[in-house]
Image (tube, grey):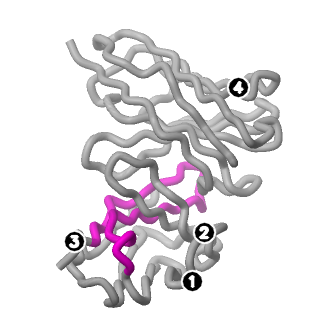
Amino acid sequence: EIVLTQSPGTLSLSPGERATLSCRASQSVSSSYLAWYQQKPGQAPRLLIYDASSRATGIPDRFSGSGSGTDFTLTITRLEPEDFAVYFCQQYGTSSPTFGPGTKVDIK
Amino acid sequence: EVQLLESGGGLVQPGGSLRLSCAASGLTLSSFGMSWVRQAPGKGPEWVSSISSDSIYTYYADSVKGRFTISRDNSMNTLYLQMNSLRAEDTAVYYCAKIGKLGLWYFDYWGQGTLVTVSS
C-alpha cells in the first residue's frame, strides 16, 4: 500500500496570499495518478486536480498541481475567502487507492 | 446536475449489519464505475470498495474484504453496500462516489454521505 504524507498539517495564511501544499508518497506513484480534493466542514470532498496537474471541471485557475514520482504539490496562487478548508491528496496508481491525512488551510 | 444521495446509515451494534443505498440522478449510472469511500471523524478518507459499470468486477479494501459486498442495480440507477459483521472501527461517514475515468480511481462526484455508527 502506498502511504501518503501531507505537509504542513496546518497552514495559516491571509486572503490574497499564496498557499503551497505538499504530498509525499512512500513509493513512486504510477503515471502521476494523483488527485487533490478540497473539503469544507460538513461537506463531501470536492475534486480539484487529477492526473497530478489537470484541473477538474469548474475549478478556478488559481488552483494548480504539479509533481511526479513521490513528490507532488498543490498551489493556490491567491487565497480567496472560500479557499480556507482541508485539502487531501489521493493516489490511484494501484488497485488500492489511498488518501493522505490532509492539510488544513486556515485564516491567519 | 449530477446528484448522488446516500441512505441507510444509522446506529448498529458490533456484529450487526446495515445496507447502504446510493441513488443517482443527472447521470446514467450504467456508464460508470462507482465506489464507496468512508471517512472516520477527523481522519482522511479511506477507499472501501469499487464496482465496474457492468458489475462484472468488484474490488475491496483489505479492511472490509469478506464482510462488505458492493452491488448495483443499473435499472434503478442505484448503488448498494451490504455491510456485515460490523466493528467499531467501521464507524464513519460513508460516501458513494463516481469514478472519474475508466480504470482510474479518482472520484469526480460525491454524495453528501451517510453516518454509520457501530457501538453497543
How crowded pointer 3 is (Cα within 10 Å; few <14, some 14-19, many 20+) is rated as: some
Residue at (27%, 67%) from the top-left corner?
A: A104
Q: Where is residue B45 in the image (x, y as percent from the top left)?
A: 40, 49
Label 2 sits on what residue type? Tyr
Q: Do labels 2 and 3 share a chain?
A: yes
Instruction: Give the CA separation, mark 1 to mark 4.
Output: 36 Å
Q: Are marks 1 and 4 in contact (CB under 8 Å)?
A: no
Residue at (56%, 38%) from the top-left corner?
A: B96
Residues in magenta, as a range? A80-105
Specify which label sits upstream in the sequence, 1 or 2.
2
User: Quick one: SS at disc 4?
Assistant: strand
Q: Is residue B93 magenta?
A: no
Label annotation for residue A61: 1
Q: Name the residue under label 3.
A: A10
Q: Are marks 1 and 2 in contact (CB under 8 Å)?
A: no
Instruction: Give the CA separation, mark 1 to mark 2.
Output: 14 Å
* Chain at tag 4: B
Q: Where is residue A21 in the image (x, y as percent from the top left)?
A: 36, 79
Q: Mark 4 points at which residue?
A: B72
**Outermost residue, left side:** A108
Q: Is residue A41 above or below residue A75?
A: above
